[in-house]
Structures are given as structure tokens and as C-alpha cells.
Image: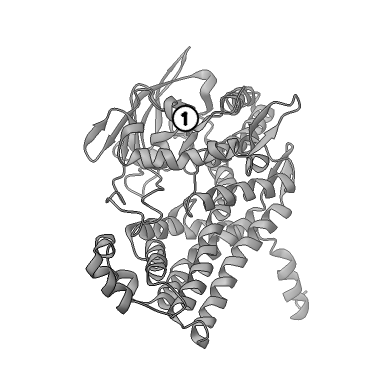
Amino acid sequence: MALMTADEYKSSLKDGRTVYYRGEKVDDVTNHPIISIAIEHASIDYNMAESEEYRDIAVVKDENGNEYSRYYQIPRNKNDLLLRSSLIEKSTALGGTLVVLIKEIGSDALFALHLIASHMDKENGTEYLSRIKNFYQECRDKDLAISVAQTDVKGDRDKSPGEQEDPDLYVRVVDQDSSGITIRGAKIHTSVSTNAHEIIVLPTRNMKKGEEKYAVACAVPANSPGLTMIASGYGSREGNEFENPISSQHKMMETLTIFEDVKVPWERVFLNGEVEMAGPLAKLFVEFHRFTAVSYKLPLVDLFVGASHLIAEYNGTINKSHIRDKIAKLITYAQICRGMTREAAQECKIIDEIAIPNAELINIAKLHFATGYHEAISWVQDIAGGLLVTGPSEEDVQNDKLNLLINKYLKGSPKVKTLNRLSLMNLIAEITSTDFAGYQAVLAIHAEGSIEAEKMTIIKEHAIEKSIEYAKWLAKIK
């Protein structure tokens, strides 16, 4: 049992995994010009564990004094959840507002699997919990990076898994024998899969009788025979540190993850045909993961506030009432996200000694973030100005003659250096106006579940009877 170093993490990815990028097979993900940026970004987690500054928040000890990543600490109470949230927020801040995710999402899945397996063992006499515990122990002790493949490609959205013309549009079990199961199909939007060690496969929705082959959860090594990852090329244009201060150094890969008769041994199978538990497992994972999600949104909304205030100072508009109005709204937006996340931890419920964030409150936090995101961006853009998309390039600034002209004509407040103003403009452009901004905007709407799914959960989780009885009492309805 030992924490992995960043160098060990990078070396461990040279394992023959099958990854394609823009139509070409990637022989070594650690040497790929784009995927290597994602690997360096993911190394933040391992570097934090080695850092004196962050070690206390990134590392915990078990009952025998052995150290392991806090991400793998099973939350037992509200304080464990709050510390987990703080770690996610800090690592994302170090990642330039981009979440690291190589342990966050995997451990979210492991927590959910512990609870569902415990329930199934009690109700059905299965032996899933021992498998989960063994796999969890392996991931924790080896300090592994874990991806989660949950969203099926779905085909015709008007049809359930068993009604699709092509049965492979949801991942399914196509064979099983004494050694394990064989799965086939594809998952989409699989984050960090190109640089993870393990991929946990989860169901994406409720299943019904007759769809037993689709009710499957398991763990698959990233280099498994038959597993192919097609990495998204979105946001891959070359950038430089001046014009692209975030995406030139930070990236997260997403893949279409294809299982072509991948063999999974029984000890790595955590759900197999129990249709009644597919939906609860999918939902429980999402509740843990939405807590992770809002935690990693906090550095981004804080940046909206800080960058807007600073660019208003640089532009000389900080005392304008309409600017201060937008900054106040941005602060409110950010602080509601933060407050609701903390409250979801404070109001957690404990089942089988595992603390689960309050589902209603964390969904409210995620809904608030998602539905307010594009308006928040518009406020930031309005405060900054059109120079976000019309400013000079790095090459212009490096040209001695043009540099003089740029310094003269693009100056804002006389107290501010022109280059500093332009650097801040480029940072704001990156989070509001570039392909990186588009990536973040789509994540705001679709990642960790849709806006409609959040609304449904809020309605389902809210204890509305008390409010109804109060209305009846005032209306004198008996």
C-alpha cells in the first residue's frame, strides 16, 4: 500500500490501451500532444499528495496508520463530506477551474455501489458487497485513477433498451460462464477515460422486466482486450499561455467508449440482471456525483466574481452603478452555490454508516448553477467589453513596433499596465468566449444529469405534505 507519485502515474499509463484521436491510433497516451496535457492536468491529484502545503487535505490514514488518498475515504459524517468538498474545490482551483476528476467520479461510484450491494445482499442473499469491498481496497491501496462509463449512446430516445432495433445501443451482457460475463455496447461522455486505470460501468436508467441483460455494473481495466476509446477532438486547437492561459495547460478528455465482447471476471461484476436495482444505482451515484459537481464549480464562479471586479478596475468602470449591480449578482450566484453545497453536507443522511449528501439540497444547488450559468457569463462579458474577442495576439505583443502601439492605444486605467489588462481579458475570454468556454457551458447544462432530472429529483425529495397541510389550514379545508 503506497501513494502513487505523479511520475509513477504517468508511467503506469503505458499499458497498451486502445485509444484513437482524430482517426489515428495513439500508441502512447503519455507522449500524445493533446492527451499528454490531460495527463499532466490529472497529475495535480498526485502532486497534491506529495506537497507539504496540501498533504493534510489530500491524504488520510487508516486505522493502522497507512496513508491513502482522501478521495477514497468513505464519508461517515458531515465533516467527511465537507472535507471532501474542500479537496475537490482546491484541486479544481489548482487546475485552472477545470476539475481533475480522476478519483472524484470513481469514488462517487464506489460509495453508491457499497450501498446498493449491501441492500441486495440483505434482500436477495447475493454476495456483491464483498466484491465491492475487495475492488475498493484494490483501488485505494494502489492509488488508482478511475473513470465511470454510465451514459449509454441510447439510439432512439423514445424507446427503452429492450425496444431498440440494435440491441447494442445500451451496454449489455451477451454471454456468461463460470469465469465471468462478456459485455458489448458503447457508452458516451466518458470523462478522463484515456488516462484512467479502471473504468466502472454503471447503468444509466431504470430497467424493466425483460431487460435483465442491460442491468449490469462492473469494473474493467482501461487496457482490456476489446475495449476501444475514441477521444473527442473538441477544444484541441493549439494555444499559447498568453491567449489561452487555462486550456494551454489544462485539459480533460472525453471518449466514446466501446465494448466489443469485453470479458469481465465475476469478482468485478457488481450488478447482473437485477433490473429493480439499475435505476436506484444510477440515481444514487448521481447524487454523490452532483455533490462533487457543485464542489468543483466553486472555483469557476469565484473566478467570475474576481475577474469581473478586477477588469472593471482596469477599465476604469468599477464605480459605475450598472457594473456594481452585475458584480453583486455574480457574488450572489457564487455564494448560493457554495452555501447550498455546504448545507447538503450538513443535512446528510447516513445509511449503512455511509453519509449521503442531502439529495434535495444538492439538486437545488446544481439547478441554481446550471440555470444561472449563461446569464452569469453575460454579466461577465458585459463588464469586460468587446476586447474579449478583438484583442491582439501573442505574436502582436512580441513584435517591438506593434507592442508600442498596443501599449499606447489599448491602455485602460492609467494605474494599470496594458499587458496586464490584456492578460486578464484573455483569461476572461477563455472562460466566456472560446471553445474552452463552450465546453464549460455544455458541462453546466448536461454534466451530472440534465436540468429536468434535477427538477424531478427536487420535487420527489421535497417533503411537501407539511406545506400542503398549512395551505389547507389557512383555507379552512378539512
Give the answer, above or below, for where 15 lies relative to 210. above
Give, as a three-letter code, the residue at label 1. Asp
Residue in view at x 32 percent, y 33 percent? 31
> Residue most toward the bottom?
321
| Quadrant (top left/top right/bottom left/bottom right) for the C terminus | bottom right
Q: How many marks?
A: 1
Taking depth in this image into account, of 62 and 217 the one nearest to the observer is 62
Residue identified by numbered label 1 = 7
Give the answer, above or below, for where 294 lies relative to 232. below
Taking depth in this image into account, of 116 and 48 the one nearest to the observer is 48
Left or right: residue 289 versus residue 156 is: right
Q: Quadrant of residue 390?
A: bottom left
| Percent position of residue 109, x then y | 56, 38
Q: Quadrant of residue 171?
A: top left
Left or right: residue 439 versus residue 460 is: left
| Percent position of residue 182, x then y | 40, 22
Q: Quadrant of residue 143?
A: top right
